[in-house]
Image (cartoon, helix red, strand yellow):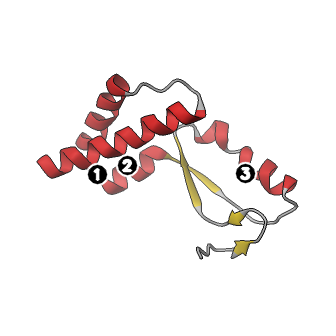
Amino acid sequence: MIRGDHGQCEKCGPTGHAVFSDAPNFDNWWPGKLLAVAAAEGTVRIESIDTLLVAEFTTEIAVRAEDGAKRLCPPTHRAAADVRHLLEIFRLAATYTKLG
């Protein structure tokens, strides 16, 4: 069981964790709505995916991976396609890191 700063919400899962988004300003209102519908208390931090990328990889590799993902799996602003795009960024960044 994952526990965040505020524990585990039985109805909606972990709270108090960071969620990474390619559009954090847009996505920031969703968690509050979801928690309200679930009649749950808690917080979810929405942070930029770039924060995670530069924490895990060099800036050069992150930029290269983002460029490659745009060609291979362009974002379309649809949830499933955008998740595939973000996963492709991390897959490419990991590959580039291994290749040196």
Could you tell me the amino acid type at mark 2? Answer: Leu
- Crowding at mark 1 (Cα within 10 Å: few <14, some 14-19, many 20+): some
Residue appearing at x 51%, y 33% in the figure: 82
User: Residue at 65% of width from left, 66% of height from top?
Assistant: 16
Assign a secondary structure to mark 1. Answer: loop
Type of amino acid under label 3: Pro
Q: Quick check: 33 left or right of 59?
A: right
Residue 60 sits above or below residue 94 on the image = above
Give how far apart the Cα atoms at labels 3 and 1 are: 28 Å
On screen, 86 above or below 43? above
Image coords of residue 91 (percent x, y): 31, 45
Q: Which residue is mark 2?
A: 53
- Distance from Cα at disc 2 to Cα at disc 3: 22 Å
Residue drawn at (78%, 51%), measured in percent from left and top? Answer: 34
- The picture places residue 79, in percent across and down from the top left corner, at 59, 34
Q: Split into 4 quadrants, where in the image is the N terminus?
A: bottom right
> Is residue 39 or residue 52 the one in the foreground?
39
Residue 80 image point, x, y percent:
55, 35
Q: Nearer the viewer, residue 71 or 54?
A: 71
**Who comes first in sequence, dot 2 or dot 3?**
3
At label 1, the amino acid type is Phe
Q: Is residue 92 above or below residue 69?
A: below
Residue behind mark 1? 57
Apparent side of residue 68 relative to residue 46 in the rendered image (left or right): left
Mark 2 lies on a secondary structure that is helix
Q: Residues within 10 Å of mark 3 (few under 14, many from 20)?
A: some
Q: Give coordinates of residue 20: x percent, y percent.
A: 53, 50
Does the residue at mark 1 contact the one at mark 2 (Cβ under 8 Å)? Answer: yes
Residue 31 tag number: 3
For residue 42, the mark is: none
